[in-house]
Image: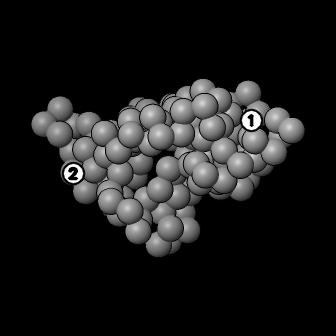
Amino acid sequence: MSAALSPLALHRENREFHSTGGRSEENRPLGFRPAFKDVASGAVYDSRFADGRPAPFHLLDGLPEEVILQRDPGGRVGRVKDSIVSGFVLEGRFYTREEAAGEVAALAV
């Protein structure tokens, strides 16, 4: 498993997946929604703002308390369990960023 997700890790992922279809900005028009999956439990969580509203990008603040490991002094999520991965949901199925990029590439052909 990879290192625990943090805001900095999400920023790095966005740089890594730039122009691949593995970012919200690039796959949203196809119906993908940013989400997280706990690979240990299988639970999938839509990305949400802290107040529960759906977020249009990956945001840790709306995840449930049981997956949060650390918050900063202002209450923002700083780190989550190692088993949490970022990805997307499309038609009820979770896709990792890699899988979403592959789907976007296949649709562009």
47 or 86, which lies in front? 86
- Quarter that holds the N terminus: bottom left
Tell me what residue is drawn at x 55 percent, y 68 percent: 42
Vertical arrangement, residue 69 with respect to residue 11, above or below: below
* Percent x, y of residue 88: 61, 46
Q: Is residue 43 visible?
A: yes
Q: Residue 57: x, y in percent?
A: 52, 32
Q: Quick check: 102 left or right of 71? A: right
Report the amino acid beneath label 2: Gln
Crowdedness of circle 1 by 10 Å Cα count: few (<14), some, many (20+)? few
Q: State which tag comes first along the sequence, 1 or 2.
A: 1
Residue 7 sits in quarter: top left
Element marked by disc 1 = loop
The C terminus - image quarter: top right
Could you tell whether 73 is left or right of 79 in the image? left
x then y, percent, for residue 32: 69, 39
Figure disc tally: 2
Quadrant of the rendered image containing residue 77: top left
State how the image is colored.
one colour
What residue is shown at x 65% (from left), y 37% (from top)? Answer: 21
Q: Is there a contact, CB below 8 Å, between mark 1 and mark 2?
A: no
The structure residue drawn at horizontal position 68% and vertical position 34%, both measured from the top left corner, is 27
Residue 16 point in image, percent of width and height: 47, 40
Identify residue for label 1.
31
Viewer-side residue, 106 vs 40: 106
Q: Residue at x 35, y 51 (%)?
A: 5
Can see residue 65? no
| Tag 1: amino acid | Gly
Task: Identify the element where label 2 is drawn.
Answer: strand
Mark 2, residue position: 70
